[in-house]
Image (cartoon, rainbow, N blue to C red):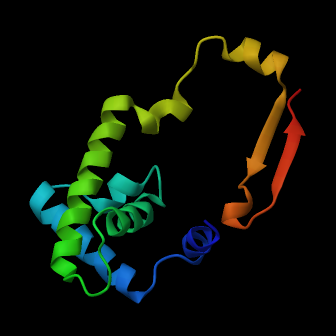
């Protein structure tokens, strides 16, 4: 929705930032993971986790912060495990079969982000 895109473009509010710090602390002490490492390949991952957790579990600002952080940590851990099992974060560094043939057939590259990130997109030809 337009509201969701606006929220993503605006980033986290003060409550979201406080929740992020709590999640980072919990992940480090309970899971032995550094949140910076977990989100290095996808900086927006934590923001999406916080928003999806709130939506999926009907959490709002009245839900205790500890409860919201605990559920978000579980969701983040599950996403990180899935990403690791599927090799999601390594896909851009992977040589795919027939990549050269593909790029010869479709020599166009997209640079930038789409309208949801409020930046310009520029297309160029490879050659």
State left or right for residue 124 relative to residue 39. Answer: right
Question: x, y percentage for residue 38?
Answer: 33, 53
In this rendering, the answer to whether 116 lies above or below 11 is above
Image-based side of 20 in relation to 30, left or right: right
Q: Residue at x 14, y 55 (%)?
A: 31
Query: For residue 125, what is the image quadrant?
Result: top right
Q: Quadrant of residue 63?
A: bottom left
Residue 43 placement (x, y as % from top left) = 47, 59
Q: Quadrant of residue 4?
A: bottom right
Q: Is residue 99 above or below residue 90?
A: above
Residue lying at 12% horizontally and 64% vertically, measured from the top left: 29
Q: Nearer the viewer, residue 53 or 123?
A: 53
Residue nearer the viewer, 67 or 17 = 67
Give the position of the N terminus as an image quadrant. Answer: bottom right
Of the pair 55 and 81, the residue shown nearer to us: 55
Q: Residue at the spot x=22%, y=61% of the render?
A: 73
Residue 120's spot in the image, x, y percent? 81, 60
Look at 32% across and 80% down and name the residue there.
60
Say whether residue 123 is left or right of residue 44: right
Q: How many marks?
A: 0
Q: Position of residue 123 (x, y in %)?
A: 86, 44
């Amino acid at each position: 929705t337009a509201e969701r895109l606006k929220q993503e473009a605006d980033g986290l509010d003060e409550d979201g930032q406080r929740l992020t710090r709590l999640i980072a602390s919990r992940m480090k002490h309970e899971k032995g993971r550094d949140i910076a490492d977990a989100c290095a390949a996808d900086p927006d991952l934590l923001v999406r986790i916080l928003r999806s957790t709130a939506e999926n579990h009907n959490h709002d600002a009245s839900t205790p912060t500890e409860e919201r952080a605990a559920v978000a940590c579980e969701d983040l851990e599950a996403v990180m495990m899935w990403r690791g099992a599927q090799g999601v974060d390594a896909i851009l560094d992977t040589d795919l079969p027939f990549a050269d043939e593909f790029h010869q057939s479709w020599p166009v590259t997209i640079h930038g982000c789409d309208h949801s990130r409020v930046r310009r997109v520029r297309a160029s030809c490879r050659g």
